[in-house]
Amino acid sequence: MADWLARIEEGGARVVDGAAQVAARLAGGTLRLGVTGLRRAGKTVFITSALNNLLLAGRLPFLDVLAQGRYIGAQLRPQPDGAIPRFDYENHLAALTGPAPAWPQATRAVSEIRIALRYRPGGLVRRRLGGVATLNLDIIDYPGEWLLDLPMLRQEFGDWSVQTLELASTRPRHDLARPWLEALDTIDPAMAADESTARRLAALYTQFLLQCRASRIGLSLLQPGRFLEPGEMEGAPILTFCPLPPAPDGRWRNGSLGALMQDRFEGYKDKVIRRFFRDHFARIDRQIVLVDLLSAINAGEPGMEDLRRSLSATLESFRHGMGGWLDWLGGARVDRVLFAATKADHVAAPQHATLTGLLETLMADRLRHIRFEGAAVKSLSLAAVKCTDNVLTEHEGRQLACIQGIPLGRTEPLVLFPGELPDSHLGLGDAVADRFRFTDFQPPPGLGRDGRGLPNIRLDQALEFLIGDRLA
């Protein structure tokens, strides 16, 4: 009954959000961009660089409104939702451009920022009617870990528990899960509910998730996301549950430990995931999905498969596609999706097309589905902040395309041959993956000193796809 009422409430909220989105689109003045990606994909860096380059407008040659001389300028404005923290653009930029350049801290909570873009419309009629127009671009950032909670909305506690326990029994998770699984074997979920037991099991399960994230493979298919990044909910009882073996008759009796964890699972869905979805995802117009393919390749086939499953599970929860006005009143839809392989500057320029091809192969099923639903889709490789240069070196009588930059943990630049990307992720076993060890680089000194904006690779092409039509 409670779940049914929650769905009615959610549907009503989506109608309101959909109507508001229709009005904003008809007015032409607001566009909401969701920056999606799992941990270490570069969401914070992308947003910082996009804002910096739109403000300074010196390094976006393929953004049509700039190339055509119609761009007037940009300003940061107060965001419309005062209850959401502002994206800390100034401190993130200072980290990248300071005396000791460093990558900004990873996203740990939802944030938002608005930038107003002023331009001259390109169409003859619009030029005659107005002359100058403004687009308010609202950019929403959120932890990648929280995204992976969205599929849980469609699951009951028993189904989620079975799925998670099955996943924990596979390599490489099984060894990491041993302390939690051994503790789970010592208790009977039908026992009377005991808070200390629930907290102990939840703590062991959380430690298992943290070890998965920190492992060499860097596993990302980890639920619930708030166990990893609790934000303002740290210490809340609603985060004290874990998967359990299925109940004999499908549901634990009232007052049992199993019933306590089942109730907290449902509370987590209602109070955390559903509210998060309604307040943020249901209102997005455009979406960029940032993907750290190079780290997954370093981890071999298990890393690539985990990344594929994580991204697919996350994207299933979004409403993609163009719809009629009545369809919009049922809730907002994402009408453009950009898939971007990040850290393109960590491989030589001739490898960028292969990097994009790997991304398209990995996400082929999801790309086809989104296109079928009616949304425009594009894939590319990019570096929101370029921190290496391409150089040619001679080795054993042949020219090698190399990169030069400062690896993390070092102070002097090195010239490295990053290796050649595989043509496909299929069959990328551990033995084959030993050929690939892509290095992480740190931002070089002097970023942004020329006043033209942070150097990048294909940020302009990404922005043209995401917002270019709204600046026409």
Image: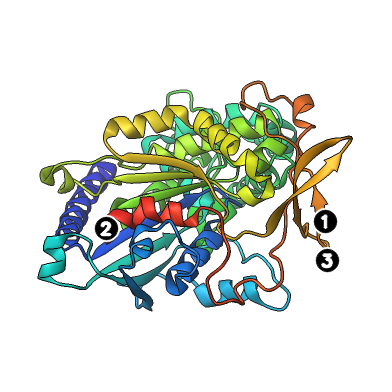
SS at mark 3?
loop
Q: Quadrant of residue 230?
A: bottom right
Q: Residue furthest right?
A: 396
Check disc 3 and report the residue beneath it: 411
Asked whether, in this view, residue 140 is left or right of residue 278, the answer is right
Q: Is residue 309 above or below residue 268?
A: above
Residue at the spot 32% in from the left edge and 59% down from the top edge: 32
Tell whether label 3 touches label 2 (CB within 8 Å).
no
Q: CA distance from mark 3 to mark 1?
A: 10 Å
Residue 207 horizontal side relative to residue 55, left or right: right
Q: Where in the figure is residue 254, as x and y percent of width and height?
A: 42, 39
> Disc 2 residue type?
Arg
In front: 278, or 285? 285
Percent across and percent down for residue 256 are: 49, 40
Q: Could you tell me how far apart the alpha carbons at marks 2 and 3 are, in whole angstroms?
A: 43 Å
Q: Residues within 10 Å of mark 3 (few under 14, many from 20)?
A: few
